Image: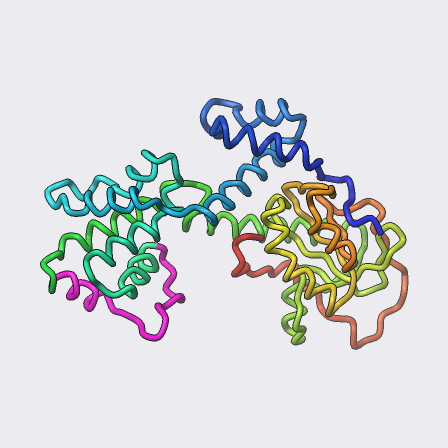
Amino acid sequence: MAVVLRDGGITYDVYKDIVKTLCEENVASDDIEGGAAKMADKHNVSTIIYNGIKSSLHQELQWNTRASKQMKMEYARLLQEINEPVENPRIVRVAEENCMDPASVTKDLVSNAIHQLQLSDKITEFILALANHKKKRKPRKASMSEASVIAAFEGIGKRKMYDMLVHDVVSALYHTSYSGPLHDIGSSLAGVEFEWCLYQLLRQRNIQFISEDAQRLVGERSTPDVRFKKPTFLQGQPIYWIDSKKKFGSPFWYKRDIIQLTRYTREIGPGLVVYWSGFVANGPELPILNILSLKGLFVCGTIPLDLTQMEEELDDEDDCEDLGDEISTKDDSED
């Protein structure tokens, strides 16, 4: 079975060329007017695919980036300059001097600073959670109040340093559009928008389905964005579900998505994953796609034209109400 459909896919060689350009030239779409469009034309891809690769690359770099010992020492030194104005974001300065994304190295720098002050690691978790506005994610074992954290800094005569750390972390997390809280919010909203587009495209073609929300209401264990109500076929093969991904399907994301997609194929059957920002097509250097192919998964960049559904009556027990118009925001911001 052909796992990769052509719509929205690019070859691995083109993908490598674009990544090489981004890494060597540090090209940003907002550097000059029409920058992304010009780079996309250069590589003969759409602007959506180019920006999707760029976003994926930033996520991969953030995932793998670690602050060097020299960066940690430099940040700890700057924190000791108590007379320096608090408005000066030290993490941003240190990261940019080393050509790194501030949000990527924030945890390493703050953790090292707290360790040098001989304070609890839970204080690092508290400061990061406070700056990131993730109230639901409490530190492991026991939650810390702000009063107790401030008291810990006052106990070592470093009360002002607490304010400096919080300010630095907030500045770093909101400094870039490719990571941090603003990116998470935008990514979540984009995921909802693409789910809505998926539902509308299926309705226009009179393809009946059960939305993710409806699946949860009836207690389904695995809940892709769409389950089909009637027998549905793609390239003559039966498929049972579709999952929508707003991101670019890169080797980095394939390795992380395969766990979820494998569970869907095991528990539901063959299906289709749509990477709306494009994807890397199959190739000898992408064995992960061969694994997905064996599991009965199709990969595409939009809804294929040859997706068909049989005109078959449904049993009453299968006639679930479609709740596609009441999509709730996903917890997974990577989709």
Q: Is residue 151 magenta?
A: yes
Quadrant in which residue 83 is drawn: top left
Near-viewer residue (241 or 309): 241
Percent of width and height locating residue 231: 85, 63
Which of 168/284 is in front? 284
Q: Position of residue 288 (x, y in %)?
A: 69, 51
Q: Is residue 29 visible?
A: no
State the extent of the magenta-drawn residues as a range. 132-154
Instruction: Identify whether 318 is placed above or below 90.
Output: below
Q: Is residue 113 visible?
A: yes
Residue 203: x and y in percent read: 75, 53
Q: Relative to 35, does residue 290 appear above or below in the rendering?
A: below
Count the marks.
0
Q: Residue furthest front?
A: 69
Q: Residue at x 70, y 54 (%)?
A: 199
Q: How are the residues colored? A: rainbow
In the image, taking residue 147 as reference, residue 291 lies left or right, namely right
Position of residue 83 relative to residue 288, above or below, is above
Residue at 55% x, 43% y: name it: 56
Question: For residue 150: magenta?
Answer: yes
Left/right of residue 48 with respect to residue 189 in the rendered view:
right
Q: Nearer the viewer, residue 200 or 266?
A: 266
Q: Position of residue 123 (x, y in %)?
A: 27, 63
Among the 4 quarters of the image, the one containing residue 284: top right
Write the residue at 36% across / 58% down. Answer: 133
Q: Nearer the viewer, residue 206 or 116?
A: 116
Residue drawn 67% across the image and 73% down it = 220
